Amino acid sequence: MSPRVGPQGPTRPTRPTPTLAFVESPVQLLNVLEWAHGSGRTPGAPAGDRPPDVTVVVLSPGDPMTRGQLRRMAELARDEGHRVRWEEARGGGTAPLRTVRGLAPLLRGADRVVIGDPFSRYVQLLLTLTRAPELVVVDDGTATMEFTAQLAGGERLVRWHRRGGRPGPRDLLFAPVSGAARRRLTPTGDRAVEVFSAMPIAAVPEGVRITANDFSWTRSRFGPPRIGAGADLVGTSLVETGVVDPDRYLDAVRALARAHGATRYFAHRRESPEKLHRLATATGLEVCRPDLPLELIARRGPIGRTVLSFPSTVVHTLPLALAGTGARVAVCDIDPDWLTERASPRAHGFLSGVTGTARDVHRLRSVCAG
């Protein structure tokens, strides 16, 4: 049975509905837990609406650090009473076909599908197989800002650091699937679409319901942390994605650490071991490889009184996770001279937007300029 249709689009059915969530990263799974925790408080939900019964499907990547964090997050999800299904979705050439076939019955039976990365080809393929009357997109970082803007503009779905470049042969081959997924993510009279996000959404697609993620689950389960007197620095994978020059990045990290007395560097899970070894040698920073998303690490503590970051998801999420603790987040802008020749033509504008729209952060323009 389809949900009732009201003035703002389809409303939630009053009965519990099977919810199927697809995640490919630890942050996506964290935000599924945040969404499930806050779903009973969603504006417009019927009084007494119960938290959803969620089956989390982990489409496991090959990267060891990501897999390790996902396994820890899966334990937390089970502790919350959710079912977790681990899929070796990239374990060999036949793995994708085998995974999709195995998930088809679940997709057909789901009344609600939650996804963390609408740009993922894997997820786009799975979206074409579902007719669920409710779709929910939870944050996969700052990419949510780009997704909502592209959906509002009727554009094809392209990751921000690749936007502006010419589509490759694989992009053209996959274009029909991507287009079908984008249409599935567009609300209709019998399909509701919700975006659950801690990011600032400038362009709201017509008919899409935006729900704020305030990290209430994280704050209720972890901390408050012990706050140290010094500073910690948060790493980024902008070098690994080809956006920022590695030498310029190293210089910026060294300047930040020296100016603020930082002693620890929390590595992004995608940062390469070679880069981190070079960084530790050149700066003297203690490199930490977190086993959970940084929001949980920071909330668990101890954490520095100042948390230094480059433009990234954490400049939006950490102030929420650390609200009321006395810790502050400071962000260093990316200088245009740091960008590589391979960087997207709109990379600097996007990164500046990430910083400029962040709430409750201190901007550090002068420290890393030049």
Image (cartoon, helix red, strand yellow):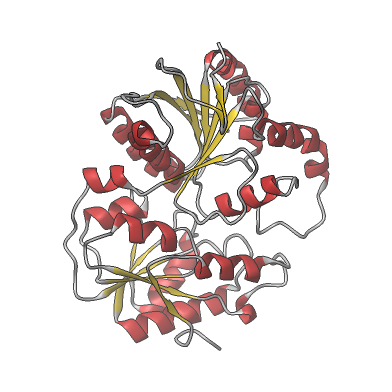
The quarter of the displayed image where residue 151 is located:
top right
Report the front residue among 350 and 267.
350
Taking the spot 29% from the left edge, 81% from the top edge, the residue there is 261
Name the image quarter holding the N terminus. Answer: top right
Report the front residue among 149 and 60.
149
The quarter of the displayed image where residue 171 is located:
top right
298 is higher (above) or lower (below) than 71: below
The quarter of the displayed image where residue 240 is located:
bottom right
Q: Does residue 74 show up?
A: no
Taking the spot 44% from the left edge, 66% from the top edge, the residue there is 276
Judge left or right: residue 306 versus residue 356.
left
Report the front residue among 365 and 134.
134
120 is higher (above) or lower (below) than 323: above
Q: Does residue 346 show up?
A: yes
Taking the spot 41% from the left edge, 37% from the top edge, the residue there is 43
208 is higher (above) or lower (below) than 97: below
Name the image quarter holding the C terminus. Answer: bottom right
**Where is residue 8 shown, x and y percent of the image?**
56, 33
